Image (spheres, rainbow, N blue to C red):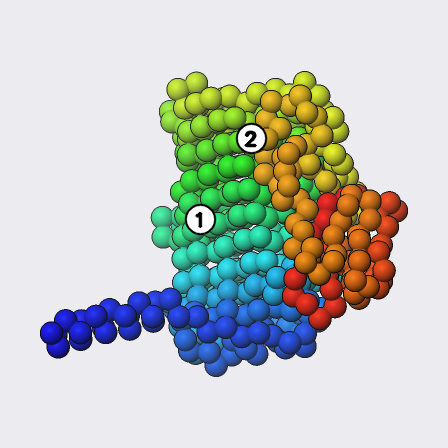
């Protein structure tokens, strides 16, 4: 009996240690790096509040940057989660430098935007979230973005290593993106590794929206495992540079899976998917695979057919399924598409300097994928686009007005964290620009997301 009780106690202790989290609720002026400095546990959660002032400091003169490699007490199997308090607060990043090894880096429930500006505007050519220098060893088991609105970056995860792909010193063994909106990106895309080094394990992307990309969306190059994209909406991508792609595996074959996706506008000359392929003596001898199911392209999706590697077409034996053509343009399909503007004199034809906020809710009731394809938040019959989480406080949205029956102090924020209105009475929204807004009651963590 004693042995049994001892065994149960050991199991319970072990289970508790595996799942225990050290949660720190930050104040608006509290530094992320200060809370990480000296931490020697294995699972830390930093909760960001509404109104966060981003006191992140600078690394090598770059503002709003964090160098995790300098934290001597940080365990190699540590998990770091940076999450919002439920109000989708804004945090600004310019660069995070990874330590030599880390178990997990996760971002959740945040509005994330680039910190570095040019002429008073966020410059997507100068901002990254993770950016590993060519000589730095940085291995992380999992990088996760969940329920985030992300904009103003050149890339989220960039590996610059030139170490041979057979022995990469920079690795993200898993990249997970779920329930996110990502927009206004420059030319490196969501993930990027150099053609000579850096490694990505499986990249899994679900229930997300991507628009306002200057070039390739997922630049995986030669050293990766696979990518699985499901229930996602793409529009206004590869909108400046030709010969780019949604997924680019360069010249090494890898599997790509596309399920329940919608592809809106892309410029002529771009490629849709590059699965990678081996060319021997001028002949394509093997290629990556592509599986397509319930995916649609608008008439202004001008990207070329999937290819193995330029200029070789993807062999039919490596292709399962096909895109279904929607007869209308992206403007016929979506409520309000985004528009990107290139910076005058930027010197880079691949740089969308600003991108308007898009509302990708399906408006064509005759569209076959109206409630089965694309990011589910935009379904024709979606109800999740408006969350009545403040209805018990007397605050609701009727489509044209934010109703405030109890006279509470309410504030309205754009998805980029800018306050656009405040009142103790109801607020008409007829003059608001199209987009997504967050309604908060001062002093409460509850929020109401509205789509106009």
Residue 227 in sight: yes
- Residue 392, picture quadrant: bottom right
Q: Quadrant of the N terminus?
A: bottom left
- Residue 443, picture quadrant: bottom right
At mark 2, the secondary structure is loop
At mark 1, the secondary structure is strand
Q: Nearer the viewer, residue 241 or 57?
A: 57
In the visual, does 12 lie left or right of 291? left
Q: Quadrant of the C terminus?
A: top right
Q: Nearer the viewer, residue 61 or 429?
A: 429
Q: Nearer the viewer, residue 45 or 123?
A: 45
Residue at figure coordinates x 36%, y 52% from the top left: 167
For label 1, the crowd category at 10 Å Cα-Cα, with few meaning under 14, some 14 to 19 and many 20 or more, is many
Residue at figure coordinates x 55%, y 22% from the top left: 323
Return the residue at label 1.
Answer: 200
Residue 240 in sight: no
Return the residue at label 2.
Answer: 372
In the visual, does 140 lie left or right of 32? left
Q: Sequence order check: which comes first, mark 2 or mark 1?
A: 1
């Amino acid at each position: 009996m004693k042995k049994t009780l001892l065994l149960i106690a050991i199991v319970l202790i072990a289970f508790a240690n595996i799942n225990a989290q050290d949660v720190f609720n930050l104040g608006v002026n509290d530094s992320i790096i200060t809370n990480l400095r000296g931490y020697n546990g294995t699972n830390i959660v930093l909760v960001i509040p509404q109104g966060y002032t981003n006191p992140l400091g600078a690394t090598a003169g770059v503002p709003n940057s964090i160098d995790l490699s300098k934290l001597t007490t940080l365990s190699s199997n540590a998990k770091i989660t940076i999450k919002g308090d439920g109000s989708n607060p804004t945090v600004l990043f310019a660069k995070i430098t990874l330590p030599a090894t880390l178990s997990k880096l996760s971002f959740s429930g945040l509005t994330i935007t680039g910190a570095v500006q040019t002429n008073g505007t966020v410059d997507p050519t100068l901002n990254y979230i993770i950016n590993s220098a060519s000589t730095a060893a940085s291995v992380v088991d999992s990088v996760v973005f969940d329920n985030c609105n992300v904009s103003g970056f050149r890339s989220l995860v960039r590996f610059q290593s030139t170490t041979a792909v057979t022995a990469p010193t920079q690795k993200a063994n898993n990249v997970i993106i779920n329930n996110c909106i990502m927009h206004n990106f420059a030319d490196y895309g969501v993930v990027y590794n150099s053609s000579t080094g850096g490694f990505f394990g499986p990249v899994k992307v679900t229930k997300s929206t991507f628009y306002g990309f200057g070039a390739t969306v997922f630049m995986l190059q030669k050293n990766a495992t696979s990518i699985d994209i499901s229930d996602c909406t793409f529009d206004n991508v590869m909108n400046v540079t030709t010969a780019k792609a949604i997924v680019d595996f360069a010249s090494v074959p890898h599997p790509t899976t596309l399920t329940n996706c919608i592809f809106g506008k892309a410029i002529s000359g771009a490629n849709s998917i590059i699965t990678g392929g081996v060319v021997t003596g001028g002949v394509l001898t093997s290629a990556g695979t592509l599986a397509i199911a319930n995916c649609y392209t608008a008439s202004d999706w001008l990207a070329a057919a999937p290819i193995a590697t330029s200029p070789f077409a993807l062999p039919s034996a490596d292709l399962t399924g096909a895109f279904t053509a929607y007869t209308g343009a992206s403007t016929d399909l979506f409520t309000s598409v985004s528009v990107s503007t290139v910076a005058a004199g930027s010197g880079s034809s691949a740089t969308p300097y600003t991108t308007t906020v898009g509302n990708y809710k399906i408006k064509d009731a005759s569209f076959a994928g109206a409630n089965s394809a694309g990011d589910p938040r935009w379904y024709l019959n979606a109800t999740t686009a408006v969350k009545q989480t403040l209805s018990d406080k007397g605050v609701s949205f009727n489509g044209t007005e934010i109703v405030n029956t109890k006279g509470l102090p309410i504030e309205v924020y754009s998805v980029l964290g800018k306050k656009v209105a405040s009142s103790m009475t109801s607020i008409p929204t007829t003059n608001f620009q199209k987009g997504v807004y967050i309604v908060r009651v001062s002093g409460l963590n509850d929020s109401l997301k509205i789509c106009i």
